[in-house]
């Protein structure tokens, strides 16, 4: 699903991703579909015929990135809480 669709419909679609998020957090495992990415070669500069002028980019699951972002935000909140 495209990230913009998720962002624009987040109030409507918040519940369905909640279920795999909770299961993933409680079991400590990610669904197998979330672990795979598509590797794309992105052109940097120079001659397009040279392999060294490309960099690899991994296109991964948007839902998995969302969960990673949530975990990161909560981790950072707890790491920098003043006591």
Image (cartoon, rainbow, N blue to C red):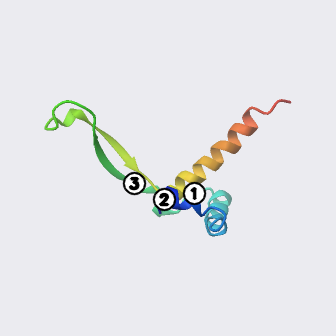
Are the residues at dot 3 and dot 2 in contact (C-beta closer than 8 Å)?
A: no
Quadrant in the rendering for residue 79: top right
| Residue 27, percent from left and from top | 64, 60
Using the image, determine if residue 77 lies above or below residue 6.
above
Q: Residue at x 58, y 49 (%)?
A: 68
State how far apart marks 3 and 2 are (Cα). 8 Å
Q: Which residue is mark 1?
A: 7
Q: Which residue is mark 2?
A: 34
Position of residue 39 in the picture relative to residue 32 (left or right):
left
State how far apart marks 1 and 2 are (Cα). 19 Å
| Residue 76, percent from left and from top | 69, 37
Q: Residue at x 51, y 57 (%)?
A: 4
Neighbours of disc 2 within 10 Å: few (<14), some (14-19), many (20+): few
| Residue 56, percent from left and from top | 32, 41
Using the image, determine if residue 27 lies above or below residue 56.
below
Q: Foreground: 37 or 9?
A: 9
Tell me the element at label 2. Answer: helix
């Amino acid at each position: 699903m495209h990230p913009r669709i998720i962002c624009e419909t987040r109030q409507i679609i918040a519940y369905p991703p909640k279920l795999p998020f909770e299961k993933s957090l409680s079991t400590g495992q990610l669904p197998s579909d979330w672990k795979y990415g598509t590797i794309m070669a992105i052109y940097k500069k120079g001659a397009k015929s040279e392999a060294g002028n490309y960099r690899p980019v991994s296109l991964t699951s948007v839902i998995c990135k969302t969960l990673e972002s949530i975990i990161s935000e909560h981790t950072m909140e707890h790491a920098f809480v003043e006591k």
